[in-house]
Image: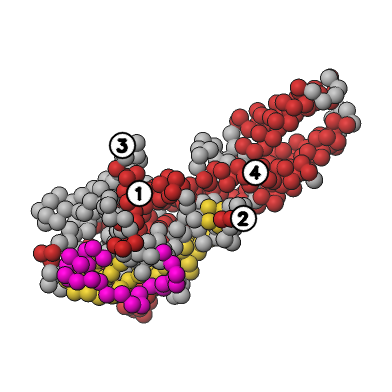
Amino acid sequence: MIGAVYLGVQSPSIQIARRTLAALSALTIFVSLALGQNSVPGWRQADRVAIITIEGPIDQTTARSVRRRIAQAEQGGFDAMVFEINSPGGGVGAVLEITGAIKGSSISNTIAWVHTDAYSGGAIIALACSEIVSSSPGSMGDAFPVIQTINEEQRRGGLRGLTPDERTKILPVLLADVTDSARRSGYDEYLVQAIVIDGIELWLIEDTETNARWAINAHEYTMIFGEEPPRGKPMLAEVTGGRPTGPAADDQTEQTPEPSSDPNAEPSKEFQPASESLRDVVKEFNSPERIGELSFDVPTNRPSFSAGDAGKYRFVAYINDGSAPIVMREDQLELLGFSSGIINTDDELKAFLGADTMIRQGESWSEQLVRFLNSTPVRGFLIVVFLVALFVEMLAPGFGLGGGVAIGALALLLAPPMLIGMAGWWEIIAIGVGIICLMLEAFVLPGFGVFGIIGLVALFGGLLGTFIPSGGSFAAPATQKDLLTGATTILLALVT
């Protein structure tokens, strides 16, 4: 794979290689299919390929399933893994679990097949692979994190943007992940940042000698060409009335430091912000508390642009106006150095990799069952059944039908969250304590007193705990959203 071969290489040759291979990939596929010959480069060729599908919203069940299938591919001796992605995105935690599993796999030949759309978390997962291909039609991008809300003042289709505190908690982690992916596989660092956040305005330039292409910001354009950058209609879709960009949009009293322009300087391992709008995020990267969490092993492959580069580069295109995170179609993915070609069928994919065997690994029936049982409507129904059956059993002493139904409903409630890491032993203990206290209140100490209150609180807390990931921080927006969902579901079940 390109990422495996050129990992850590600092010269622009990695971009030349990627674009040359992208231009030739269609011809390679055609020749392979027509002549039945293996004309695939050695770094890409794989005899046994596992196709791991990622379909629909990404959640903890998806993350667990993908990790299982990666482990199966490793144990099965596969040479390459293709992650077939058609997803609108999903939870940040689940997405980062998947990217970590891909990068940490012993199988380095990893290909993201954007078939048909990879938005939000789907795009971040695609970037974690060492190579990307796309179907036609196909699109990838817009990984801007949003929060679900019930605040009417902030409501916009049930979603809202990040508050300043959420921005500095969530964005650095996402930007660190996609930047690491870009450095591993040779993608443009500024472009991957523009996938995650708005406020980043970029222009495309080309080295007149090597034809290597780079995305640059307004400040770099002015340094190189000695004039204000051209605007107008951007290559990628713009959002009318979106976020203003450019130097005038930011307070210039505290600028982020510019990268060194010394051509002999060691390549930096620090985060390279694409825009002054990321000033608050840069502070997080440089804070002592987060340096270990947000550090990079691979240095940047971006050149240090300066006024001395006048005449070395030519202007190619105005990429985007920064009013929204970027979304790229299949042709734009190739043009901007992300995609190595268009793949529409399994046969074309097989020829692209020169594979003898390709095996699809989808979600198992048990994982699909866990996903169904862990859905909010189903869990709300099971809570209703559990509570009704429990109180029926309490009203009719002895172990009968009500007790059996209550135990069955409770098992269906607890098993799926435990399998995907959203419930632990404390939730089971809390629910057990709650049931015992309520039974003591009903049979031993009639009336509603201390044991009844303790029982209800323990039961509510135990059930609520099954809605949030084990070890999750209560300050995290995702955890707060899960708590709100759980509390609402349990209260509605109690009322029912």
For residue 288, the mark is: 3
Q: Are marks 3 and 1 in contact (CB under 8 Å)?
A: no
Which residue is the site of mark 2? 152
- Residue 42 relative to residue 447: left or right: left
Mark 2 residue crowding within 10 angstroms, few (<14) / some (14–19) / many (20+): few
**What's the amino acid at mark 4?**
Gly
Locate residue 332: give its quadrant. bottom left
Marks 4 and 2, the one that precedes in the sequence: 2
Whole-angstrom CA distance, mark 1 to mark 2, is: 28 Å
Whole-angstrom CA distance, mark 4 to mark 1, is: 31 Å
Marks 3 and 4, the one that precedes in the sequence: 3
The foreground one among 71 and 418 is 418
Mark 1 residue crowding within 10 angstroms, few (<14) / some (14–19) / many (20+): many
Quarter of the picture containing the N terminus is bottom left
**What's the amino acid at mark 2?**
Glu
Which portion, as a residue range, is magenta?
218-243
Which residue is the site of mark 4? 486
For residue 84, the mark is: none
Marks 1 and 2, the one that precedes in the sequence: 2
Q: Nearer the viewer, mark 3 or mark 2?
A: 2
